[in-house]
Amino acid sequence: MSTPKIVLFYVFTPLADPDAIRLWQQAICEQHGLRGRIIVSPHGINSTVGGDIVQVKRYVKATRGYPAFKQADIKWSDGTGDDFPRLSVRVRPEIVTFGVPDEVHVGPDGVVGGGTKLSPGEVNELVADRGEDVVFFDGRNRIEAEVGHFAGAVVTDAQSTRDFVPLLDSGAYDHLKERPVVTYCTGGVRCEVLSSLMRARGFQEVYQLDGGIVRYGEEFGDDGLWEGSLYVFDNRMTVEFSDHAAVVGTCARCGAQTSGVANFPDSLGRELAVLCPGCEADAGESLEAASR
C-alpha cells in the first residue's frame, strides 16, 4: 500500500431501496480492497472507509456517481494501512442510532427541522458576539469527550447515542432552552439528528457545527476553541490537529494526564477506557495472563 487514507462522509437523503445501496457499496469496497464501516438506511448513508489512496479515490468517484450522493462532503485523513479489521456494510433503521427513527424526517435537502448550520468561522463569530451565553453541547458519547471537547462544553453522561433522547426528555437540560446552543460531534452526522430532536423538544436557538470537529480542526487546529484530542472510530483511536494539542484526558487507572483511549473492559464493564500508555500495557498483560 503506497499512501493509506481514510474518508468519512454522510448524506441524509431518502433511499427507497437501502439494501440495493448496501450491495452496491459492498461491491465497490471489495473491488478496491477497502475496509471500514458503512451504514445505509431509508434516511441515507454514513460511511468511514480506508485503504490505498488510489483505491479510495476510485471509491469516492464511484459513490459520487450516484445522483443522491453527488454532493457528499468528503473528509479525508491520513491512515496507517491497518485502521479497520474488516469491511462492514449494513442496513439499519437509522444511520445514527438514536432509537427514534419515526421522529427523524428526511427530505431531498437533508434532515427536516435541524439546527442552523454554522461553519467553523461562524461558530467563532457567534462566540465573539454572544460570549458566555453560547453553550457548546457535545453530541458524542462521554468517553469520546473525555479526551477532547470544546472549551466549557456541556458533556452528558451518554454511553451510547440511544441515551440522548431519554436525557433530553428527563428535563436535565431544560435550563438551556432559551440560550444559543451549538451542537457538535466528530464529523457532523450525529448533530444533524440531535439538533432536530432538541428543536422538537423546545430548544429555541439551536445550531450545529457544519462538518463537525474534523472541519473545525482542519481550519483552526489547536488555536481556536477546541481543546484536546479527537476520538476516531478506527485503530488510531485518537488524532491531534497540531503538535501542541492540549492533553485533557485523565487515565482511569493512575490518574495521569493522557490522550490515550484503549479497548479495555474495566470494572464498570465499558468497552473503552481512557488509559495512559503505561496502564494500557499493564492492562494488556493482565488480561493476557488471565486468559491463560
Image (spheres, helix red, strand yellow):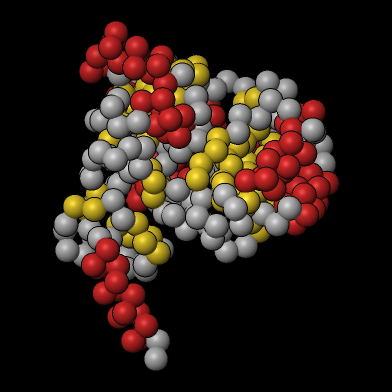
Question: Which residue is rendered at x = 77% and y = 49% of the image?
Answer: 28
Residue 48 vs residue 30: left or right?
A: left
Residue visible at 60% across and 33% down?
74
Quarter of the image for residue 290 reads bottom left
Count of residue discs: 0
| Percent coordinates x, y for residue 164 in the rendering | 44, 41
What is the quadrant of the C terminus in the image? bottom left
Q: Residue furthest bottom?
A: 292
Tell me residue 23's x, y (percent). 80, 51
- Name which residue lies at 23% across and 18% down: 132
User: Relative to 4, is 244 above or below?
Assistant: above
Q: Is residue 99 something one can see in this rendering?
A: no
Instruction: Spot the residue most to the front.
Output: 2
Q: Quadrant of residue 203?
A: top left
Q: Is residue 20 left or right of residue 186?
A: right
**In the picture shown, does residue 127 fall above or below 59?**
above
Percent of width and height locating residue 153: 29, 32
Q: Is 262 situated left or right of 15 in this image?
A: left
- The N terminus lies in quadrant: bottom right
Nearer the observer, 190 or 86: 86
Q: Residue at x 45, y 34 (%)?
A: 214
Residue reaching furthest to the left: 255
